[in-house]
Every structure is written in C-alpha cells, then in structure tokens.
Image (cartoon, rainbow, N blue to C red):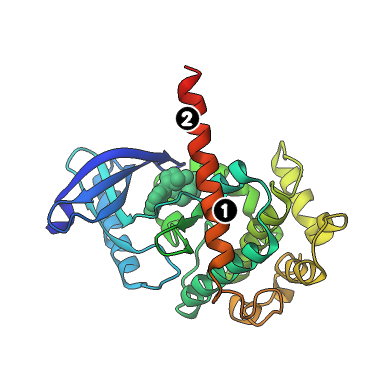
Amino acid sequence: KSLRDIDYIATLGAGASGQVELAVHKQSKSKMAVKIVNVFDEERRKQLLKELETLTTYVSRFLVRFYGAFYDGGGAVHVVLEYMDSGSLDEAIKVGGKVPEAVTKQIAMHCLRGLSFLHQYNVLHRDFKSANILLSRRLNRSKLADFGLAKELGEVSKAATFVGTMAYLSPERLKGSQYTTAGDVWGLGISICECLLGRYPFEKPDSYFSYLDNAMMGDSLLQDANISSEARDFLSLCLRVDPNGRPSAAELMKHPFVAGHDAQVREFTAWLEGVLQKKKQRLRSSKSST
Ligand code: ATP
Ligand code: MG
C-alpha cells in the first residue's frame, strides 16, 4: 500500500496517545504527519483500523486531512495526517501570549466551519481544545485536528486521553451525560477564551470536582476581561451551562463576532509570522545557552 511508502524524518511532538512524526511520502515528496499509537491487542487493532477508515471520508479545507492508518507489524498503528507547518494554537499562545481579537475572530470562524461540516454528518470531534487547532503559514489558515480520533484511541488508552482532556469537558459531560455536538461547542468556547486571555481561563483545577466547579461558572469567568461586547456575547453563548441553550456551530457562524471575518487573511498572517519569529528566537537562545 502506498500509504506505507514514507520516510520518517523528525519528531514533531507527543500527546496522550503517542508521538507524532514528520514524514515524507517517497513518490510525491509531500510532507505528512504520522501519529504512532501502540496497540498491542490484535483484535483491538483490527477494530481500530476498520473504524479509522471511515474518517478518511471527511474532507474539508478546515479539517486536517486524515489520509488513513496502517499497522507496522511491531505493535503500533500509524495514523497518517496532513502536515500543518506552524504547530498548534496552544503553543502559539504560550509563545505569543494573547491573540488579537481580529485574529481570534478568524480562528473562531475557521473552527466553526470545520465543526459545522463534521456536525452536519453527525460526527463529533470529541477532543476539541487549542492543542487540536493546528496552524498553517502556507495556507494562512487554522484547521481542526484529531476529530473523531479520541473516540477510537480512547478505547485503547482510556485513562491517558481522559485526563488530558478534562479541562475542555462541558458541565453536562463532567456530570456523566453523553457527549454531543454541544460538547464540541463548549470546547470551542474555552479555546477562544484562551486566545483572548492568553491563558487557560480557569484556575488550574486540582481535582475532578474543581473541573466541575469551574465549568458550572460558565461565562462568568469573563466578567473582568478586557474584551469587546461582541466577543463577550459570543463566548457567553458557547459557554452556556445548559447544553440545550448553546447554539449550534452553524448558528454561531452568523454571530456578529465572527460573521464575514474569515475572508481577510492579512491579520492572521501577520500574527502567525510574529509567533513563528518568536519561536525561532526562543530556539536560538535555548541553543546558545547550552
Ligand atoms: P491529543 O492526543 O488529545 O490530540 P495533543 O493534541 O496534545 O493530544 P498530539 O495530537 O499527539 O497531542 O500532538 C502532539 C504534537 O504534535 C502537537 O502539539 C503538534 O505540535 C504536533 N502535531 C500533531 N499533529 C500534527 C500535524 N498534523 N501536523 C503538524 N504537527 C502536528
Ligand atoms: Mg492532537
């Protein structure tokens, strides 16, 4: 199978489910990202590969393309993804701090386009967070990564994925209800808060109960934030404690905070270039100090 004809070049990062490698497809020379996940149980592996196959059908400009997955024969499943050249939104916020509102609008709109695309097929993202919003300088766009993967990989490494994602779980989900499209909208709300505040909006919780306490506060955490009234209104909708009161992704696309703001790429590009420059500087100074 041609999916396997790839050279692994470098490690891009590591997450709850495994590590992510930069790879080059031998024939086309195109770059790809490959997530390597250990699944030792053969039955599980077969099941996983079959279920992952369905994800290849969801193709959108606002979703990180899922090319497919294969077993390497040594206990690991390789999940082949579109390569995004500028890392994740959470890294960008760590390096660059607050994201300007003009840029945040654009990112929010990209996310809503990706999310509404998935939701129209009743596919849930299930792991919506700023670490799964990836950035591309080449395309001048952000895209959603790892949609639907949490469900499949969660079966494999339950504890690990769950802990990592608790910070983005909606109140209803923390109380044990089923995951729904409204849960994804909540995750979007938290991620957009991170952009505007430059940090995770809640105090770092130390237990399950404080995650729930935090989530029950909904949008009241934004009371003192220095943000526009449109941004505040948008977030108060995403972070409604009652999931039935939360608008859908398609509805949110019409909100004045985001409507019409994704056509313009100038602000996004300027911001991303600034972030990439800071990343480079950091890398240089960490090299020279060792
Ligand atoms: P989760 O397993 O819940 O998705 P995560 O998003 O923190 O957790 P990974 O998805 O494993 O972790 O990604 C780890 C790192 O690898 C990311 O921070 C990102 O920098 C990089 N990465 C992941 N996917 C890609 C991709 N498609 N293109 C480029 N870099 C990627
Ligand atoms: Mg991820």
Nearer to us in this view, 189 or 62: 62
Q: Position of residue 199 (x, y in %)?
A: 69, 46
Check disc 2 and report the residue beneath it. Answer: 284
Q: Position of residue 96 (x, y in %)?
A: 62, 45
Q: Secondary structure at mark 2?
A: helix
Q: How many numbered marks, from 0 up? A: 2
Res 169 seen here? yes
Asked if residue 284 is positioned above or below residue 236 in the image, the reply reads above
Please name the amino acid that badge 1 sits on: Ser
Q: What residue do we see at 69% from left, 48% from top?
A: 198
Nearer to us in this view, 175 or 59: 59
Residue at the far right: name it.
Answer: 224
Would residue 227 be found to the left or right of residue 13 on screen?
right
Q: What residue do we see at 76% from left, 43% from top?
A: 210
Q: Residues within 10 Å of mark 2 (few under 14, many from 20)?
A: few
Q: Position of residue 130 (x, y in %)?
A: 57, 53
Q: Residues within 10 Å of mark 1 (few under 14, many from 20)?
A: many
Would residue 215 be found to the left or right of residue 17 on screen?
right
Mark 2 or mark 1: whose residue is earlier in sequence: 1
The image quadrant that residue 55 belongs to is bottom left
Check disc 1 and report the residue beneath it. Answer: 130
Asked if residue 51 is positioned above or below residue 86 in the image, the reply reads below
Nearer to us in this view, 242 or 20: 20
Q: CA distance from mark 2 to mark 1?
A: 25 Å
The image quadrant that residue 271 belongs to is bottom right
